[in-house]
Image (cartoon, rainbow, N blue to C red):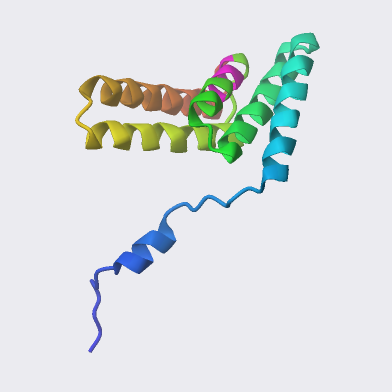
Amino acid sequence: MIMWFKRKSEKNKNENTISKKKLTEDQKEELLGFISRKSIEVQSLTIENQARVFEEIGLAYYELGDEENAIASLEKSLQLKKTIGESFKTLLKLYNKKRAEAAESNDVDNLQTFLNKIDLLMQISKDVTRGVK
């Protein structure tokens, strides 16, 4: 018998979620060193290059699991240069995660904050697609 609408088991649900790889202490130290070098470097760059460096810093923080700093750096990157790339996708993931956490804890203010931020990201997506600066 074929089951068209078979429910996913808990095991399958967990496999489909985004899994974070575990970092070794050496990898963490390397990422922190990278972040500190790039943080110093960013001050002497043009705006377009600053956007790229803030994106790199944000992605490094994301890899470390430091979501707050990742969000801050990725937001700076998108403020300097609107692009739809890895920073956009990562920021959208983080916003959705924070939104879900706020919904789960019935935190209406944070829920609304992250819904608004997601709306702004969608507007950036539309602007970039249309070529609006």
- State the residue at coordinates (24%, 34%): 103
Question: Nearest the camera: 43 or 22?
Answer: 22
Instruction: Inspect the magenta stretch and tell me whether residue 46 lies in it.
Output: no
Name the chief secondary structure element in magenta: helix
- Residue at the spot 30% in from the left edge and 37% down from the top edge: 100
| In the displayed structure image, the side of residue 6 where residue 55 appears, left or right | right
With respect to residue 109, does 15 lie above or below? below
The answer to whether residue 36 is left or right of residue 82 is right
Observer-nearest of 114 and 107: 107
Q: Furthest-front residue in view?
A: 25
Give residue 57's position: percent from left, percent from top.
66, 27
Q: Is residue 85 visible?
A: no
Residue drawn at (59%, 38%) of the image? 64
Range covered by the magenta-colored residues = 74-79
Magenta-colored stretch includes residue 76 = yes
Residue 71 on image: x %, y %: 51, 26
Does residue 43 show up? yes
Q: Position of residue 106 (x, y in %)?
A: 19, 30
90 or 63, which is in the foreground? Answer: 63
Query: Quadrant of the image for the C terminus?
Result: top right
Q: Is residue 5 left or right of residue 59?
A: left
